[in-house]
Amino acid sequence: MTARPRSLVVKATSGLDRPEAANQAFTVAAAAVAAGVEVSVWLTGEAAWFGVPGRAAELELEHAAPLPDLLDAVLAAGTLTVCTQCAARRGITADDVLPGVRIAGAAVFVEEALREGAQALVY
């Protein structure tokens, strides 16, 4: 019997308000992508802004990989989603987000997080 591959769902809840937590979420996600894990990153709260072009570059954190590089790694091999309600509260539309970023709601998050073999982390 073949084991089903594991997947990682990372919910990032912090933006520039908590740079270490924001960077850690993307660091873990990018490391998982590099290890060949199926990765889905959800941007909620202030992290929703990282789905908009140029916003990741605003986060600077000493001794950490640049957030735009981590975001690009996730987009290259994973899924990046902005929470529907979080986007609406910030006036972010599908036309505003980076190519490859989707806007989706809680039902899709729950589906991904509860998938067999999935591990969910919240930062």
Image (cartoon, rainbow, N blue to C red):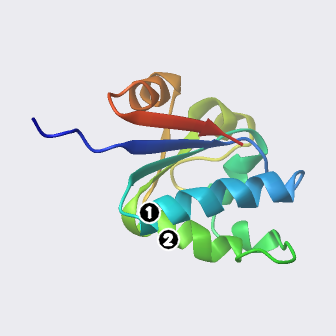
Q: Within 10 angstroms of label 1, few (less than 14), some, or many (20 or more) residues?
A: many
Which of the pair 78/86 is nearer the observer? Answer: 78
Circle 2 residue: 73
Note whether 98 is above or below 46 in the view shown: below
Note whether 100 is above or below 65 in the view shown: above
Residue 12: where, in percent of width, then height?
Answer: 67, 45
Looking at the picture, which amino acid does disc 1 mark?
Val
Residue 68 occupies quadrant: bottom right
Looking at the picture, which amino acid does disc 2 mark?
Ala
Q: With 25 as the anchor, is 20 left or right in this view?
A: right
Q: Earlier in the sequence, mark 2 or mark 1?
A: 1
Does residue 99 appear anywhere in the picture? no
Does residue 52 appear anywhere in the picture? yes
Looking at the image, the residue that sits furthest to the front is 1
> Who's the residue at 67% across and 58% down the image?
50
Q: Within 10 angstroms of label 2, few (less than 14), some, or many (20 or more) residues?
A: some
Note whether 76 is above or below 91 in the view shown: below
Circle 1 residue: 33
> Who's the residue at 55% across and 57% down the image?
29
> Who's the residue at 53% across and 64% down the image?
31
Which of the pair 99/33 is nearer the observer? Answer: 33
> The C terminus is located in which quarter?
top right
Label 2: element kind: helix
Q: Count every numbered label the image shows and give the total.
A: 2
Q: With 105 as the anchor, is 77 left or right in this view?
A: left
Disc nearest the viewer among 2 and 1: 1
Which of the pair 14/54 is nearer the observer? Answer: 14
Residue 45: where, in percent of width, then height?
Answer: 75, 39
Residue 2: where, in percent of width, then height?
Answer: 13, 40
Label 1: element kind: helix
